[in-house]
Amino acid sequence: MSAAKDFPRPGKRSTPADRASMVRVDQAGEFGAVRIYGGQLAVMGDRHPYGRLIAGMAAQEERHRAAFDAMIARRGVRPTLLAPIWNVAGFALGAVTAALGPRAAMACTAAIETEIDQHYADQLEQLGSDDPELSTAIADFQAEEVEHREAAIAHGAEQVPAYPLLYGAIRLGCRAAIALSKRI
């Protein structure tokens, strides 16, 4: 694939294939987020002081996933074939970061949501006015992802030991998952 397809030039309109890829990758990402929070809650439980916060973010991610599930069905978009991997990987990431402690779980959220904020911003730029339904959903969900990142930082994400390493590794993994889910 050409770099121009991966990184659209300003003013380039999105194609139906681009929009199908966006729906596919966004559904995969929201599914992964649901699984991450599921893993965190499995370790920390809903009685943990951060349990309510995590459960609230998980509920929003579930709503996002359901919206993209509906778009996949309505638009006839093939979901990613990597869902079984994201199922296990997302849960494992959530469980491992929660086992490292609540601040590590928050660092995971901060890293993921930083990456998703940029991912959604790139999509909105590429979409322009080509697909109002998709643009509206992405913009609404992006605002909630930013809230999740801000909440994670407010709850000590940056105070976890080796934060730059953990944050960077999770962001790198998220970027790889995005790149793979666009195509597979």
Image (cartoon, rainbow, N blue to C red):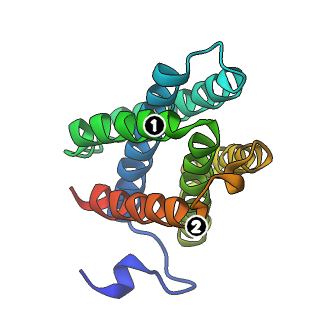
Residue type at mark 1 is Gly
Q: Is residue 82 above or below residue 179?
A: above
Res. 10 image quadrant = bottom right
Task: State the residue position of label 2.
Answer: 164
Residue located farthest toward the top when viewing the structure as drawn: 47
* Residue 23 or residue 57, whichever sits in front: 57
Mark 2 or mark 1: name the one nearer the start of the chain.
1
Rendered image: mark on residue 7: none
Residue 21 at x, y percent in the picture: 35, 57
Res. 7 image quadrant = bottom left
Rendered image: mark on residue 94: 1
Q: Is residue 81 visible?
A: yes
* Residue 81 or residue 55, whichever sits in front: 55
* Residue 21 or residue 114, whichever sits in front: 114
Q: Is residue 57 left or right of residue 82?
A: right
* Local crowd size for mark 1, using a 10 Å CA cut-off: few (<14), some (14–19), many (≥20): many
> Which residue occupies 62% across, 36% down?
102
Q: Is residue 174 above or below residue 137?
A: below
> Which residue occupies 56% across, 61% down?
162
* Local crowd size for mark 2, using a 10 Å CA cut-off: few (<14), some (14–19), many (≥20): few
Residue 91 at x, y percent in the picture: 37, 33
> Which residue occupies 52% across, 34% down?
98
Instruction: Identify the element where label 1 is drawn.
Output: helix
Q: Is residue 71 visible?
A: no
Residue type at mark 2 is Pro
Q: Is residue 156 above or below residue 181?
A: above
Q: Is residue 37 above or below residue 176?
A: above
Give the position of the N terminus as an image quadrant. Answer: bottom left
> Which residue occupies 45% across, 70% down?
14
Residue 137 at x, y percent in the picture: 61, 45
